[in-house]
């Protein structure tokens, strides 16, 4: 039987000036209690698992469409979203490091039963919405590489994920290395693609630093890009993954952990940012090439993951198409692994319910496979591509219901103590969150108005649909307002105010510190057990 992971040991330890080790009893990585830049390597790992969500098939789909339709004009959205993502993900990591609880656990402790249940349902919907592009993307990749029918590939994705999840029995470090390898594989594939496509560097730089948003179509794609970049489930995931490290429980130790996790996240998200820029640049260069055939020009007007493969093969050669398929397969499989973990943390945190990960994966996969299978059979690759865009927009609309609790918790001294957000960080994060929510609300209202005005339905039906739709918008706004204006009530015990001297580690289990608390709830949900 394999020992569980991500568990906090309760025994006394001192790890001063010792190499990074993985605890054989709990499989938890112990960070040496020393002031050294070498400690950064102890924290490397969670950021790469989180970065996978920024380069999943949903991102590829929206990146391809934005490049095909608007060339490099929407690159600045990727830059803004990546900067916002770094700030937000750092807050999620800080919450876990300082309090020893992940975001879902804080929500359960803070909110009443009904709001807590609603937040859990929304979190589960976001995970399913995230899983749909991963299922379809993997199916596309299998079709490109092995000519497997799309609907068969959809069915095969659930089984393939369980194989990769079995890697965890070899330790959390091995799993993190494997995910990092997949990230670098994706990066290498698109570096080669850039060499084939040769986009104009000056136009790429202009697209990155000169904002442009022309037309409602660009607004819709911009929201899809935001939804695909900043995902709600990633906030729950990151705040839990950092618990795989045992950090020194002192003021300086916690500050160092927060700083190193920020650096580690910046490295991982920088790689993800470059990959997204590469996808848009390749798509923009290929679809705006002067020597495109009429068939390829038609394909660029409604570009999806499957058409992209044929387009790259026709314009850049068959090897370019295979590289894209390999990158897509690596993206889809790695995303499903992290999605399964996020689902486990969400279910455990909100409901105190723990399932074996293969069961959790099966349930999530079924919810994602059913609509994917129906759409792939009826609508083919074009319908599957549209489903990815819809799923990305759902993620963007649901982001406030994970982001607002995170911002409030990390800004609260009752939860974070001395490590609460500074005034500047609080202002910046709330501005970023408010802008995202404002864009979402604007798009909901304008899209709904256009749908009603151009639907061609009877006036009575339009009126009733308008009343129902705007009622839904009011409920959406009311939910956001509740989370924003509700005061935090639950006090989270962290380090006491009269902490030891800087650099001194708290190791006494009776002092109420984090590591005196059993963390088996973080671990027993992890995979897999050897039979």
Image (cartoon, grey):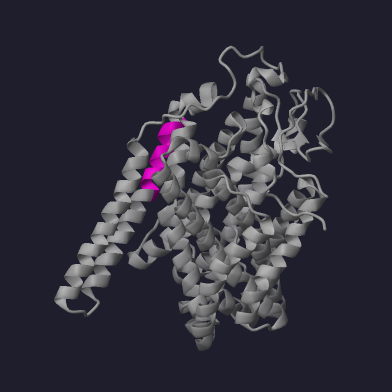
Q: Is residue 282 above or below residue 252?
A: below
Q: Residue at x 60, y 66 (%)?
A: 365
Front-most of residues 246 and 79 = 246
Specify the farthest residue to the left. Answer: 459
Q: Is residue 170 above or below residue 27?
A: below
Position of 148 with respect to 17 (left or right) is left
Residue 188, picture quadrant? bottom right
Give the image quarter of residue 160. Answer: bottom right
Question: As rendered, which of 24 and 400 lies closer to the eye?
Answer: 24
Asked whether residue 429 is drawn in magenta, I would say yes
Is 290 situated above or below 88?
A: below
- Residue 154 point in image, percent of width and height: 62, 75
Q: Per the image, is 380 magenta?
A: no
Residue drawn at 69 percent across, 44 percent down: 523
**Residue 74 on image: x %, y %:** 46, 60
Position in image of residue 271 (x %, y %): 64, 52
| Residue located farthest toward the bottom when viewing the structure as drawn | 294
Query: Position of 89 compared to 244: left or right?
Result: left
Q: Residue at x 47, y 67 (%)?
A: 389
Secondary structure, magenta segment, majority class? helix
Judge whether residue 75 can be spotted in this image. no
| Residue 393, quarter of picture | bottom left
Count all numbered tags in the image, as a single digit.
0
Looking at the rendering, the stretch of residues picked out in magenta corresponds to: 425-436
Rendering coords of residue 173 (x, y %): 78, 46
Placement of 500 over or under 252, stated as above or below: above
Whether residue 167 is visible: yes
What residue appears at the point 49 percent right and 32 percent down from the top-left corner? 410
Query: The C terminus is located in which quarter?
Result: bottom right
């Amino acid at each position: 039987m394999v020992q569980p992971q991500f568990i906090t040991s309760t025994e006394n330890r001192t790890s001063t000036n010792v190499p990074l080790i993985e605890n054989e009893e709990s499989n938890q990585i112990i960070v040496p209690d020393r002031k050294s830049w070498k400690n950064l390597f102890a924290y490397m790992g969670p950021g790469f698992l989180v970065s996978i969500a920024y380069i999943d098939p949903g991102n590829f789909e929206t990146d391809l469409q934005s490049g095909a339709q608007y060339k490099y004009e929407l690159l600045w959205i990727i830059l803004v979203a990546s900067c916002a993502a770094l700030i937000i993900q750092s807050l999620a990591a800080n919450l876990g490091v300082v309090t020893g609880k992940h975001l879902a656990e804080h929500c359960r402790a803070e909110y009443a039963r009904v709001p807590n249940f609603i937040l859990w349902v929304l979190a589960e919907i976001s995970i399913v919405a995230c899983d749909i592009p991963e299922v379809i993307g993997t199916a596309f990749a299998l079709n490109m590489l092995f000519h497997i029918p799309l609907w068969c590939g959809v069915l095969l994705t659930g089984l393939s994920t369980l194989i990769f999840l079995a890697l965890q029995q070899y330790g959390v470090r091995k799993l993190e290395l494997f995910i990092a390898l997949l990230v670098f594989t994706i990066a290498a594939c698109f570096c080669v693609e850039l060499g084939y496509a040769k986009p104009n560097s000056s136009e790429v730089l202009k697209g990155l630093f000169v904002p442009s948003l022309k037309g409602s179509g660009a607004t819709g794609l911009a929201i899809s890009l935001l939804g695909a970049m900043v995902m709600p489930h990633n906030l729950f995931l990151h705040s839990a993954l950092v618990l795989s490290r045992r950090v020194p429980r002192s003021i300086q130790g916690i500050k160092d952990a927060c700083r190193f996790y920020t650096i580690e996240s910046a490295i991982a998200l920088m790689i993800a940012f470059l990959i997204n820029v590469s996808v848009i640049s390749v798509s923009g260069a290929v679809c705006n090439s002067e020597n495109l055939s009429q068939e390829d020009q038609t394909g660029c007007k409604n570009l999806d993951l499957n058409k992209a493969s044929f387009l790259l093969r026709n314009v850049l050669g068959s090897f370019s198409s295979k590289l894209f398929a390999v990158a897509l397969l690596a993206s889809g499989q790695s995303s499903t692994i992290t999605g399964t973990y996020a689902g486990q943390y969400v279910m455990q945190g909100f409901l105190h319910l723990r399932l074996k990960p293969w069961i959790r994966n099966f349930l999530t996969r079924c919810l994602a496979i059913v609509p994917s299978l129906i759409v792939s059979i009826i609508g083919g690759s074009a319908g599957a591509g549209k489903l990815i865009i819809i799923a990305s927009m759902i993620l963007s609309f649901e982001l406030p219901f994970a982001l607002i609790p995170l911002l409030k918790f990390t800004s609260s001294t009752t939860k974070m103590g001395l490590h609460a957000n500074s005034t500047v960080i609080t202002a910046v994060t709330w501005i970023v969150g408010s802008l995202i929510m404002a864009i979402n609300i604007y798009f909901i209202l304008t899209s709904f108005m256009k749908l009603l005005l151009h639907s061609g339905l009877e006036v009575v039906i339009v009126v009733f649909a308008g009343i129902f739709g705007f009622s839904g918008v009011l409920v959406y706004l009311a939910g956001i307002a509740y989370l924003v204006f509700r005061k935090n009530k639950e006090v989270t015990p962290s380090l006491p105010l009269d902490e030891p001297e800087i650099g001194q580690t708290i190791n006494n289990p009776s002092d109420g510190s984090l590591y005196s608390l059993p963390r088996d709830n973080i671990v027993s949900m992890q995979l897999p057990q050897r039979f």
